[in-house]
Amino acid sequence: AQTVTQSQPEMSVQEAETVTLSCTYDTSENNYYLFWYKQPPSRQMILVIRQEAYKQQNATENRFSVNFQKAAKSFSLKISDSQLGDTAMYFCAFMSPLNAGGTSYGKLTFGQGTILTVHP
Amino acid sequence: KAGVTQTPRYLIKTRGQQVTLSCSPISGHRSVSWYQQTPGQGLQFLFEYFSETQRNKGNFPGRFSGRQFSNSRSEMNVSTLELGDSALYLCASSSTGPGALPMNTEAFFGQGTRLTVV
């Protein structure tokens, strides 16, 4: 079974600065997908960024980028130019690829989350 | 395009009762999955439905069940409620089908149903 670990329960950063959230995972699979989700106080889970394991290039979405180290099973999220609206709980998540007859359909395995607070 | 709608948003039930939560996915999405979120256990996968069939199930007791209708709307039911069932229940929808790459889709989450068992 896959596991996802986020070792930082809480992080804080000043507005406009850069912060990195850590995530490690454990799997025996070679192909899989990794995600970072954001959950603000409204509780709405929002996809921030995703990475396919077969792609060596790190994913980027505007101010958000990842450092994907497949051999080390590490998937960190870097937020540049932090904004007050980035304050939220951030979850790292793992998904196995869909395959006929498999048991991985629609299953996201989440880490415990990191509470990020951006201070003005 | 309307998002994922979960009803009700809040619910208070007594131990021993049963409860039904509803999730309406985004129009055209055929996959619906459910998660339980608690401070102690975090986010845990309950089950996933696609075209009215349960394709995957998490490690929860049989008191937790679900179903999906022909219009893709899904319900989950918890019978004989326990205090430990108090949680935020999240539903997510996507358009993934058999063999589809999840990278072609995204799991869209609803705002959840906050269940309190007293």
Image (spheres, coloured by chain):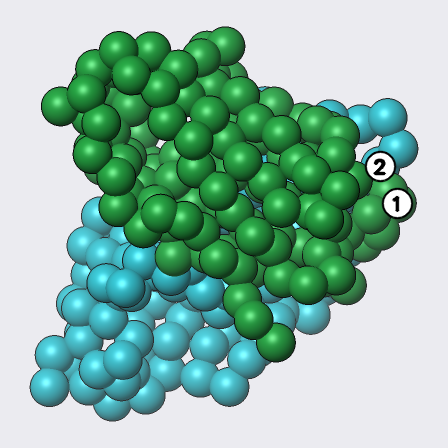
Chain colours: A cyan, B green
Percent position of residue B10, x then y: 26, 46
Residue type at mark 1?
Gly
Q: Which mark is residue B99?
A: 1
User: Can I make out residue B112 in this image?
Assistant: yes
Badge 1 local density, few (<14 within 10 Å), some, or many (20+)?
few
Quarter of the N terminus of chain B within the rendering? bottom right
Q: In the visual, does B1 lie left or right of B12?
A: right
In this view, the residue in front, A119 or B64, is: B64
Q: Crowding near pointer 2: few (<14 within 10 Å), some, many (20+)?
A: some
Residues flagged by tags 1 and 2 on a common chain: no
What chain letter is assigned to the residue under label 2? A
Instruction: Give whichever of A6, B85 is nearer the camera.
Output: B85
Placement of A110 over or under A51, stated as above or below: above
Q: Nearer the viewer, residue A74 or A109?
A: A109
Query: Which element carries disc 1, helix, strand or loop?
Result: loop
Return the residue at label 2: A99
Q: Residue A13: which quarter of the image?
A: bottom left
Q: Residue at x 50, y 31 (%)?
A: B76
Up the image or down, A61 lies above or below A116; here it is: below
**Does A22 appear above or below B10?**
below
Q: Is residue B38 left or right of residue A111?
A: left
Quarter of the C terminus of chain B within the rendering: top left
Query: What type is the residue that disc 2 sits on?
Result: Asn
In the rendered image, is residue A53 in sight?
A: no
Left or right position of A89 against B105: left
Q: Residue at x 38, y 76 (%)?
A: A79
Q: A80 or A50: which is nearer to us?
A: A50
Residue at the (71%, 56%) spot, across then down: B29
Q: Are marks 1 and 2 in contact (CB under 8 Å)?
A: yes
